[in-house]
Each structure stands twice: as C-alpha cells, then as structure tokens.
Amino acid sequence: MAGTYPERLETTAALLRQARTVVAFTGAGISTESGLIDFRSPGGLWERYRIVTFQEFLDSEAARAEYWRMRRELIPALLAARPNAAHGALAELQRLGKLQAVITQNIDGLHQAAGSTEVIELHGTNLRASCLSCGRSWPIAAVQARLEAGEAVPRCSGCGGLIKPDTVSFGQSMPEQALTEAFDWARCCDLMLMIGSSLEVQPAARVPLVAAEAGSNLVFINRTVTAYDHLAEVCFSEAAGRVLPDLVRTTEIAGPNE
C-alpha cells in the first residue's frame, strides 16, 4: 500500500497485533546501520575481490590464499560491529511475544548479540571457523590472529585439514536443517517482515515468496525495490533502524486487542 509513513506504520502495527505467527526475514541491509557494507554495494568487497567458489577453495592453494586475503579484511569489521536499533527492535518484539522467529541471510551474529532467540542462519556464521576434515572448530578471532601473524592459508593444527569459516560459499550446499526450518516457518506464519534484502540470492530469496503463496501477509522494509514488492501489503523505503523501533512503540501503545 501507498500512504504516509504514519499510515503505513499503523497498518503494519494492526497486522502485527492480529497475527498469530510472525516471522522476520533479514538480509544485509539490516546491518548496514551497524557499519557493515553490503558485499554488493558500491565500495563493497566484491568490487575489490573476485568471488572464490567452494570448489576453487578445495582445489587450489592460490584460490585459498585469495579467499583468506578477503576474509582478513572482512573479519575485523564483523567482530567490531554492534547491533543497531533494528536488531534491538526485533529482539524486543520477540520478548513481547509478537515475533516467533528470525530467518537471516546474514553471517554477522548481530541478531543473537541483540538478544534474539530462534535465529535461523541460512548462510552460516562468520563468528566461527571449522576444519573441513575433522570438524574441529575455532572462534574466528583465533583464525584472524593467525592471518595477522602471517599465515596465508590456515590449516588445522590437529589433522592438517583445510580451515574455512562456517559460512556458505558460492557453490557450497546450504545447511539443510536451516533451509528446512526456514521454509517451515514461511508456510506457517501469517505475517512476515522482510527487512534489508534484495531477494536475489536463491534459494533463500524464495522464503518470502513461499510465505505469500501460503497466505501470509508481507511487509517489506527495504531501501531499494525488489521483484516481489507487489506481493507486500506495506512497503517502507525508510531505514529499518527507524521503522522497527517505531513499530514496537506503535504496537505497545495500541495494545494487543486494538
């Protein structure tokens, strides 16, 4: 729907109060207000580094070194980032019992840092890394220390296997359990808040579409248009850090049965 910001906010608050099962679906846009640049945005990492596919990572030492050069630049920003007002508002909606789950494409861990529970990470997490051979795991800060000490391609100290962040690379299978849970939530929710995603990366981008096909109302909070805007009951182009805290306040003021 079109309309003024207060009108769109009140319509969304009414949908939120009426819904029994509410799910948030988030992309990189929710974390830009925490200082994290979307990989695809101007100045993002993909303008300076090429994408190293998972198969290249497995096959080529040179590709692994290229991958870790990019990660060495990325990891400090991820570790320094803090949740912003949008993350906090989603955590508050969960605390109030208005939001049942957060499905995220993000790898930054900021939803959990803000206090959200029932967070489904479709693309994994950058906060840990694991050996692809034996499964041993480390905090990503420990791997970053090794990179900064001069290691070009960190390997497992136990078995010598390849270490990789617990994120999904291009060409790597997505975590089956997370994907199943995401689509299960999409099919059972009656309101989905889609926040900060271009809805271009498949299969994750199908989650809001599946929700719509199952009869859920959609609310989009996104700086840019998507191919699915026509499916949304309400679209916001304002910053998520403004809209979500306003939504919490509007919902609380009106009360659960208004």
Image (cartoon, helix red, strand yellow):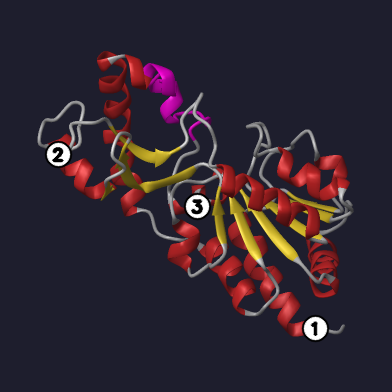
Kind of residue at disc 2: Ser
Kind of residue at disc 3: Glu
Q: Which mark is residue 157?
A: 2
Residue depicted at 68% across the width and 69% down the height: 99
Residue 53 covered by magenta stretch:
yes
Q: Answer left or right for 231 relative to 133.
A: right
Marks 3 and 1 sit apart, C-alpha to C-alpha, by 30 Å
Q: Answer left or right for 122 relative to 46.
A: right
Q: Position of residue 248 (x, y in %)?
A: 67, 73
Residue 63 covered by magenta stretch:
no
Local crowd at mark 3 within 10 Å, few (<14), some, or many (≥20)?
A: some
Q: Position of residue 154 (x, y in %)?
A: 20, 32
Marks 1 and 2 sit apart, C-alpha to C-alpha, by 55 Å
For residue 48, what is the image quadrant? top left
- Pointer 3: what residue? 33
Kind of residue at disc 1: Pro
